[in-house]
Amino acid sequence: MSQEILNSAIMQIRAKALEAYGIIKDTYRQPSKEGDADKIAALSLKLAQLEGGMLTLQQYAPEIIAAVDAELAAEKAEALNPPQDVEDLSSDEQSADSDSTISEEQLADRSATFRKSTGTRRRKSKKKSTDE
């Protein structure tokens, strides 16, 4: 989408707001009749809504444009530098990734921070001599 589309949307909203304003003026200019107040009230609500939409779109248009430009730049950079596949990892790294889950007991033995967070003390492990 280009910036012209956003500008076109802003101009369309402005045109509709000017139309509602003009109808309010014409209604006021004519001799009063039953229902004029309701008509002016409805048109003024429509005018306020259109003006709010126009101002909001004008306010956010630069951010919309910048965000889309950043996304497009990221897509281009990704296309030029594709990410490495998992197949590029050595078999040692792949096996280490698959064995990376540890039990809560192992975590309590290894991590002082985990022990502090759970309020447990480190157990004296009899397996240390057999593990080494």
Image (cartoon, rainbow, N blue to C red):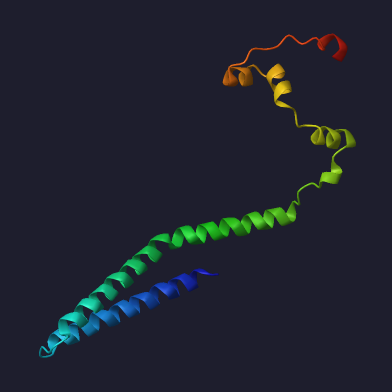
Q: Which residue is pictured at 55% across the width and 60% down the height?
A: 68
Compared with residue 38, is residue 31 higher up or lower down, i.e. above or below? below
The x, y position of residue 115, in whole percent, is 62, 18
In terms of image quadrants, where is residue 80? bottom right
Left or right: 23 in relation to 105 = left
Compared with residue 2, is residue 96 higher up or lower down, i.e. above or below? above
Q: Which residue is pictured at 43% across the width and 74% down the height?
A: 9
Left or right: 117 in relation to 94 = left
The x, y position of residue 131, in whole percent, is 85, 15
Left or right: 41 in relation to 93 = left
In terms of image quadrants, where is residue 14? bottom left
Compared with residue 105, is residue 122 higher up or lower down, i.e. above or below? above
Q: Can residue 35 be seen in the rendering of this structure? A: yes
Farthest-out residue, left:
31
Q: Quadrant of the C terminus?
A: top right
Q: Can residue 132 be seen in the rendering of this structure? A: no
Q: Quadrant of the N terminus?
A: bottom right
Q: Which residue is pictured at 37% across the width and 63% down the height?
A: 56
Q: Which residue is pictured at 73% across the width and 9% down the height?
A: 124
The x, y position of residue 126, in whole percent, is 80, 9
* Front position in the image: 85 or 43: 43
Counting the numbered discs, the total is 0
The x, y position of residue 42, in whole percent, is 24, 78
* Front position in the image: 62 or 47: 47
In terms of image quadrants, where is residue 112? top right
